[in-house]
Amino acid sequence: MYTESVDIKSSVINNVLMQMSVYIEKAAIDVLQRILEEQFVFLNMEQITTLPSEISETAEEKNRYLIELFKIKKRNLSPRTMEQYLRAVGSLAAVIDKPLTDVDQVDIDYYLRWYQQRNVCNNGLQNQASTCNNERRYLSAFFTWLRKERFVSCNPVEAVEPLKEARKPIDYFRPSQLEELRDGCRTERDRALVEVLRSTGARVGEVVQINTADIDWQTGDILIRGEKGGRYRTIYLDEPARYYLQKYIAGRTDGSEALFVACRAPYGRLHNSGIRASLKQIAKRAGMQCRVYPHKLRKTLGMNLKNSGVDLGCIQEILGHGNPGVTARYYAESTPDTLRSVRKRVAA
């Protein structure tokens, strides 16, 4: 290996995993890593230092090695999260053009300024502070991994402060808008989809994984594995959601185990893009002027819970936020609807 801070055992394990990842599946990689680590526990290894220590790899080759190793070692990340991390790191490597292990605070600061301005030539607009902070977060996750793996001594992203974000009001459906959305439903799948997203507040990537056998029809409980972090939690179908979902399932003849399937043969499992497209069609038929997308129904549940006086800790559990700070960021501050709800309760 080209980095002296990585011990020999880790280097051997990493290289074996890299080589074998071409031939075996992720589950087998997990087993192989565990076996190698167990075998190396009681083994002392010394590096031969009589050969020249000059390293011939280019920056591109070094970076490719690190990125491929990251993909293997962080293989349990969700595909979407992995995609965002790899895109950000690849972009940084292309702009800075140096080994990722040599990147410092100045490089990160330069890159994030470039990232903020990169669209100005095309549309005259800077990337928003929240977009830049997300990019910073993706890079920080990668360099934190490099530090933990001892490729670098510190995370250079930590020294660069995030941009100050202007907090925007939460975008959620008011009761009248939900009724408009329901009016745009033309099929049993349309209505079931709206009610499931509204009732559970699940992420669209979580909904597409659900099978009909996962549902407890007596309680409305569904045990799911969260899209972020892989933690299990229980989401809930209320009575209207169960009613319309059962109508939809009863009318199907496809035999698929998936909760939602395509309308045409071969009736495959509905994916994220299919749910988004369905909601757009429903909104278009209803003549709705506001933005309509799956995550808005998730935020609607969060706001309904908040306006009903539900504790932030419970909202965090229901929505599956791994970090309580995320819940507080969106649902701690009072809104006109919240204050109106409080006044009504006091007046009663």
Image (cartoon, grey):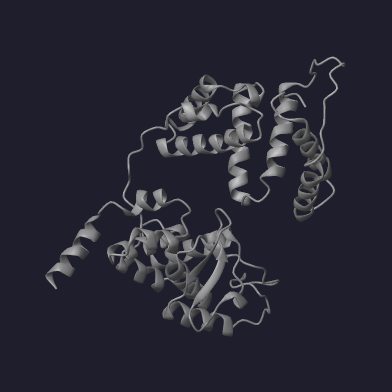
Q: Residue at x 17, y 68 (%)?
A: 344
Report the residue that reaches farthest toward the left: 347
Q: Is residue 25 above or below residue 250?
A: above
Determine if residue 288 is in view. no
In the drawing, does residue 267 fall left or right of residue 245?
Answer: right
Q: Is residue 43 above or below residue 124?
A: below
In the drawing, does residue 129 fall left or right of residue 269?
Answer: left
282 or 225, which is in the foreground? Answer: 225
Q: Residue at x 85, y 48 (%)?
A: 23
Expressed as whole percent of the image width and height from the top left, the position of residue 131 reads 46, 38
> Which image quadrant for residue 129?
top left
Q: State the quadrant of the C terminus.
A: bottom left
Q: Residue at x 87, y 16 (%)?
A: 50
Expressed as whole percent of the image width and height from the top left, the position of residue 201 reads 45, 64
Q: Residue at x 62, y 35 (%)?
A: 148
In the drawing, does residue 24 fall left or right of residue 101?
Answer: right
Q: State the quadrant of the N terminus.
A: top right
Q: Is residue 214 above or below residue 116?
A: below
158 or 302, which is in the foreground? Answer: 158
